[in-house]
Amino acid sequence: MRRGMQSETPLPTRLVSNEEFPPLPQTPAQRVVEERILAEAGRLAPRLGLGRREFLRTSGGMATSLLAMNAVFGRFFDVLPIEAAEAAAFQERTGAPYFIFDVQVHYVGDHYDPRDEEASRKGAVAKGNLLALRQRARKLNPKLEADKGTLADLSWQNFVKEVFFDSETAIGLISTPPGPYPQEAVVPPKEMTHIRDEINRVTQSRRMLAHGLVTPQLGQADLDFMDMQAATLKVDAWKAYTGAPPKGFHHGWFVDDEKIGYPMLEQARKLGVKRFCAHKGLPLGPVPDYNHPRDLIKAARDFPDIDFLVYHAGLLNATAPKPTGEIPWTTEFCQMKKKEPALTNIYMELGSTFGQLVTVNPTACAHLLGQLVDALGADHVLWGTDSIWYGTPQWQIEAFRRFEIPEALITQHKYAPLTRAVKEQIFGLNAARVFHVDVNARRNEIPKDYLSRMKMAYLEEGARPSHRWYGWVTG
């Protein structure tokens, strides 16, 4: 495996990992998609007076990519051939812009784990090991010698470029993978809130929110840390990793454990920060079962005033659905939720889940979206991308904007179609309601000279997407 991937194609043609699950190799279907994209771009680019790489950076490149996906997987994207050749046609069919609130975005702190001490901890996220692994990969594959990526790829400056300059994202909620202790996470709460406050100060508008971290296995120390995060850092929500134990512990915990989880939820209630975001699915840590979302049902029932956000929609992995449309873990949780119609405080988030499924298996993606809307309602599904592991969120935005559940699946499984009204809710209106954000408030741009002063190396050719993904790929 190696981190990062530079590609001509506007969307990934192999599974990219957010480093919380091992990526699968490129599938035969994905290889055909890639070949079709490059071949069609090679045919169209000269007619427009462009090189192939340059063409693929335009809207025509995205249209070409979605058309190739349709040709290989079946018609899942609302795109016409004319849009590949005419930018005006692509823009006209794109429609009015959406308000986009991404409730899961990432970067890596400058000082995270410089001695790579995390690599040996069970269940750790080995961000500190990135450079060593990159060097090892170059020895195994000399073609990677041209890959000049460093930890600066994952810096907050590059994060701002990818998320706010190169995508339509209006608001982002900074998240972080865990560390040995919450104060030593990949991006500690103090740094997340500092970057939030700096960006909001520079723009004089609300462009960024930030998570705090909870680790209830630490007992009173965690409750005290929660108090500091709420009072001093003014965190916007809590982030929990039930499967990744802190240093010194050998297994995870369940949210509905009345001795471990409930004191933490009671503290969240007391502090007035009543948004609880849990990593569920994508098994992280030594015991996968702690990542199953089932424990959120009882917790949500017992704490009706707290909103529970199920990150990654509880997806176990990016496998093909069964003939019945069953998606591992997510389908089971949706069935559990349907038996509790009175529960209105559970939300399903799409970070990594949509990005994985839409490129690997659009049929599974259609089943998952159909089941989420059916079980929880279109007003309880939240947009998240897990970028910058997947590069700029823009390719995911374009893919979801054009994504449709095929009529055959709608008829067979009674799924609701993904109308514009449904997508408006998912893209941002639902998160705005949960986080008390004024959708109509003016949001000022982040000035590029501000990032220049912070010594960010912006793209030489200007504000154009890099077609780079920063998560892990198998290659």
Image (tube, rainbow, N blue to C red):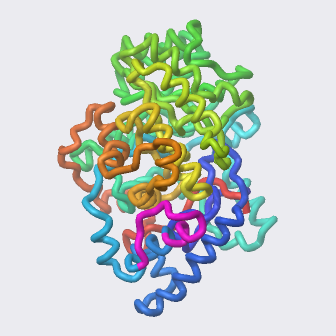
Write the residue at 36% across / 21% down. Answer: 273
> Which quadrant: the N terminus?
bottom right
* Residue 320 against residue 209 in the figure, above or below: below
Write the residue at 35% across / 36% down. Answer: 379
> Which quadrant: the C terminus?
bottom right
Q: In this view, does 24 lie to the left or right of 35?
A: right
User: Residue 373 at x, y = what percent?
Assistant: 43, 38
Q: Nearer the viewer, residue 361 or 149?
A: 361
Write the residue at 71% across / 33% down. Answer: 123
- Residue 161 appearing in the image: no
User: Residue 439 at x, y = what percent?
Assistant: 23, 42
User: Residue 224 at x, y = what percent?
Assistant: 47, 14
Q: In this view, does 380 lie to the left or right of 242?
A: left
Q: In which quarter of the image is residue 285?
A: top right
Reply yes or no: does residue 72 show up in magenta: yes
> What span is in magenta?
67-81
